[in-house]
Amino acid sequence: MNSDTFLGKFYQFGEGVLFLFYVNLLWVIGTTMGLLFFGVGPSTVAMFTIFRKWSMGEKGFSVGKIFLAVYRKEFWRANTLSWLMFLFGMMLIVNLQFFAVGNDTWNFLFKAVFMIIFLLYMIMLIYLFPLYVHYQTTFKQYFKNAFLIAIYQPVRTIYLLAACFTLYYLWVTFPIFIVFFGASLTSFIVMWISYRTFARIEYKQSLLQEKEDLLQQPIVNREGMTT
């Protein structure tokens, strides 16, 4: 069907909606299979893996097979990553709720610092799963890279946060859609924006590498002498 026609665009839209619904259903099933506590991590990693492929323009792959394969392969590693982030987040929330000093000024300053740290944590959390499915590295590097991207890509990060807040407003306004598209639409938008951020960073790194290689090459003057 011609995608330039109205019917073609409508067909593509319907196909996309069904795709999001199907991935969301797989995420719910995977999370339930892991009894929630052990299913969220691997299900989320499998979901982000699918949307990474979609963001890269890959088509025609078997969604169910890829989801199940990634779910099995990354089960323990994904659980380790998700539980680390959960425990760190709970620690921040507990400190924010119960930490207090006698002086009101110092108490306000400590609360402000904790709020900044918690905001950075939330940004890192948004980037963490896209980084996990896009790069193969250590947990330490995942956390480090998530933090560095949040700091050194402020415009892209604000863009991503704005998209997340827009989705939050959508879910609050129409909570019924959370059941059908909550996890899948959120992860798709986060992965789509994050992938383009990664591509931008990789492009800049390739330009710097080319410049460095060029500077390292010997320069030959007109007399044929190397300088």
Image: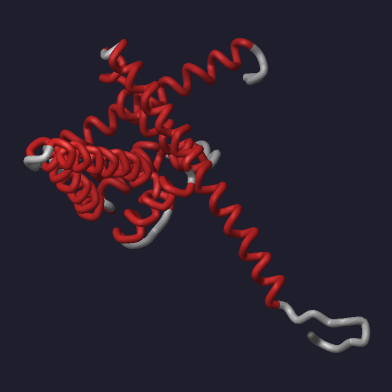
**Residue 74: % across, % down:** 27, 52
Instruction: Count up the numbered dots.
Output: 0
**Residue 78: % across, % down:** 25, 50
Q: Name which residue lies at 45% across and 42% down.
A: 52
**Residue 130: % across, % down:** 39, 45
Image quadrant where one finds the C terminus:
bottom right
Q: Is residue 163 above or below residue 42?
A: above
Q: Name which residue lies at 47% across and 41% down.
A: 154
**Residue 21: % across, % down:** 35, 23
Residue 34 is at least partly visible in this image: no
Image quadrant where one finds the N terminus:
top right
118 and 129: which is toward the camera: 118
* 182 left or right of 55 in image: left
* 118 left or right of 129 in image: left
Q: How is the image coloured?
A: secondary structure
* 75 left or right of 136 in image: left
Residue 24 is at least partly visible in this image: yes
Q: Name which residue lies at 57% across and 58% down.
A: 205
Query: Toward which corner of the image does residue 179 lie, by quadrant?
Result: top left
Query: Toward which corner of the image does residue 25 lie, by quadrant?
Result: top left
Q: Is residue 32 above or below residue 77?
A: above
Which residue ends up furthest to the right in the rendered image? 223
